[in-house]
Image (cartoon, helix red, strand yellow):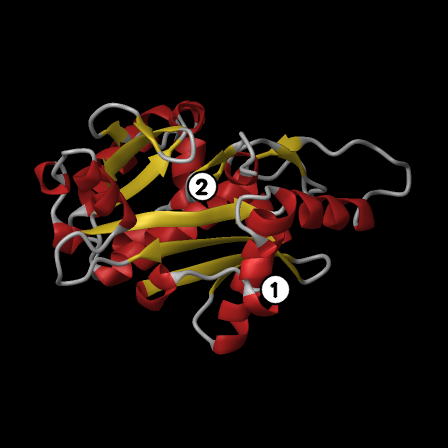
Amino acid sequence: MLNERCCGNLSLDGFLKSQPLSLRNGDNSPLDQLEANFELVPANTRELTEAAFALRYQVYCLEREFEDPSQQAGKLETDEFDRHAVHSLIFYRALSTAIGTARLILPQARPNSLPIQQLLKQNGLDAGDHFPNDLVAEVSRFAISKTFLRQSIEAASSPDGKRARHSNLPCLGLIQMLLRQSIELGIEYWAAVMEPKLLRMLAFMGIRFQPVGPLVNHHGLRQPSYCHLPSMLRNMALTKPDSWTVVTNNGELMCLPNAAELRLAA
């Protein structure tokens, strides 16, 4: 049975719901805190890719009951879109534990190769009216394990039992990885199918997606959406500069060779 707090390929709790973190340097900037406590890794080896699949099994099969665990061989959650996707992981440094993962599904030459394109077609909409096929990737399987994060926090908690504060740093860290991969691949648009509540939470962090058509019935009511990365980053820089600093690694990503278009947002 599907959990109400899952949103298609994006887990609402895993993606954006604020989680407590034990931060080493509470007075430092969010980017300093991210670098001190987490490591961002492209899952570009078999070992790391399987770690991402195992984490997806934890989140989507066990925590969220979104997928049937009996259908996932070897306790690895995979699907047909992994064949043309790039994956990433975020590790909690204190325990060297992977707590979050995400993927970008890349478009293929054939029409409607992305899940969102197929969904829109089923509902009489043309994705090409909103984003070009050769410049878009679909954000998918974006999740942070509540169980693993909680275990990491408990293991690294201070002896006096002092409550750690809340933060969205793991989420912003994964978004930084998605942005880095997108720049390297020449991607200028992100697409996703999201719960309306999740869209509002993303917007609060400065990550604004535009709706494509009306809500659709896709594991409950969901909103097909997209964002143009230069426009999103420009708005984030103006309205949420702390988020922009983390997502762009203090502007470093804007200076990559393939980031000419994105530099309009600096």
Q: Quadrant of the C terminus?
A: top left
Q: Position of residue 215 (x, y in %)?
A: 30, 24
Relative to 113, say whether 42 is above or below.
below
Amino acid type, mark 1 = Lys
Mark 1 lies on a secondary structure that is: helix
Q: Position of residue 60 (x, y in %)?
A: 55, 48
Quarter of image, res 97: bottom right
Judge left or right: residue 250 versus residue 23: left
Sequence order check: which comes first, mark 1 or mark 2? 2
- Residue at the disc numbered 1: 75
Quarter of image, res 154: top right
Mark 2 lies on a secondary structure that is: strand
Instruction: Look at discs 1 and 2 and give the one toward the viewer.
Output: 1
Marker disc for residue 230: none
Q: Residue at the far bottom: name it.
A: 46
- Residue at the disc numbered 2: 10
Q: Residue at x 24, y 61 (%)?
A: 185
Q: Residue at x 20, y 58 (%)?
A: 186
Q: Residue at x 81, y 50 (%)?
A: 155
Disc 1 residue crowd, few under 14, some 14–19, many 20+, Cα 10 Å: some
Judge left or right: residue 170 versus residue 128: right
Amino acid type, mark 2 = Leu
Relative to 76, say whether 212 is above or below.
above
Relative to 30, say whether 92 is above or below.
below
- Specify whether residue 94 is in view: yes
Q: Residue at x 39, y 49 (%)?
A: 140
> For this rendering, which residue is in front, 166 or 217?
217
